[in-house]
Image: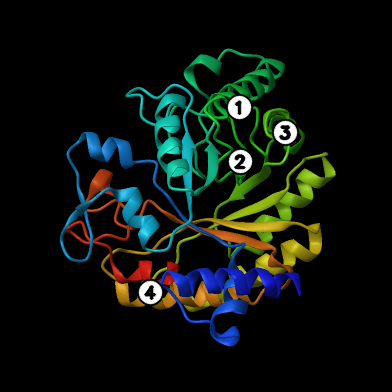
Amino acid sequence: MKKLKIGLMVCLIGLYMGLTSCSDKDNLEPTLNVSHLAKGADVSWITEMEAAGVQFYNAGGTAVDGLKLLHGLGMNAVRLRVWVDPARGWCNKNDVLVKARRANHLGMRLLIDFHYSDNWADPGQQTKPEAWKSLSFEGLKKAVSDHTKEVLELLKDNSITPEWVQVGNETGNGMLWEEGKASVSMANYAALNNAGYDAVKTIFPTAKVIIHLHNGYDNNLFRWMFDGLKNNGGKWDVIGMSLYPSKENWEERNTACMANIKDMMDRYQTEVMICEVGMSWDEEDIAETWLKDLFSKINSVPDQKVLGVFYWEPLAYGGWNGYTLGAFDTNGRPTKVLNAFK
């Protein structure tokens, strides 16, 4: 009854503003069922792109603030990566704060993604920050904790509260190699992860901590990692996944990813976040079909245990940094794939 009253109030407000009709069937229940879902994008490049003079355009060709454009297309959340001491400054704590403020001003939800590196951390590289390279293992744990707290305290001091925090990025073989390489020492990786986990909870006790792996369709990888972490006292709140299918295999990958999601929820009693998705920008028809299918499957999962989907750098276009899996065309306008977020 409480849900119905809330839905009715929202509907009446909508009627007053001329925005909606008041059909219970068409408006109330679908909105309530999916309102928990984070529909977002990693926009970590946006300040660097703007500084380089890159502009973003709506479907009519009018230049628009990129973040506001994504928000208007149905996105309610952003993901921001953090590098420790990047050579050019982009994605350091101060750059993250600038972007987080903009998202917060729009009322968007926030996921912070710690790489624990001065540059990209992913399945092929988990390079320690230059300033951490001579540290002992105990020193590395302290550095992870101190860096995590420093960045999150900066956000807290500016009245910004992230809802989710990733401790590491695509850590399918651990982080801070070689000491934290999971295939060498799962115990070391678990200890480094826990240093980050505890630091997050110190600053934001209610934030959900994500461990994020690549290849969300690979159940063997996920079982190996999370069995290993569990056996070594590893802590997490949410299991994160990446999913980058091609036009040829998207149906197979969606099916396998959903099977993996259900296995993770059952095996570890955990929630799941799809932290990264993407497909080639010039396959927009197929990409739209793929992503709508993924959202449809996610919305069928009971108990709202899939928390959301984040498109990875949709604003990248025109060969920006060699990336071709964005969601804007060569004219800087959104492609059809973003219809899935509406």
Residue 256, how many percent across, how many down?
60, 72
Q: Mark 1 points at which residue?
A: 148
Measured in 3D between alpha carbons, the distance from the residue under mark 4 to the one under mark 2, in whole angstroms, is: 28 Å
Q: Residue furthest front?
A: 16
Q: Name the residue under label 3.
A: 201
Q: Mark 4 points at which residue?
A: 288
Measured in 3D between alpha carbons, the distance from the residue under mark 3 to the one under mark 4, in whole angstroms, is: 37 Å
Q: Do the residues labelled 1 and 2 touch (CB within 8 Å)?
A: yes
What is the three-letter code of the residue carrying label 1?
A: Thr
Label tally? 4
Q: Which of the 4 image quarters holds residue 160?
A: top right
- Residue 162 badge: none
Q: Is mark 4 on a helix, strand or loop?
A: helix
At 39% from the left edge and 56% from the top edge, which residue is drawn? 71
- Residue 165 badge: 2
Label 2: few (<14), some or many (≥20) within 10 Å? many
What is the three-letter code of the residue carrying label 2?
A: Val
Q: What element carries label 3?
A: helix
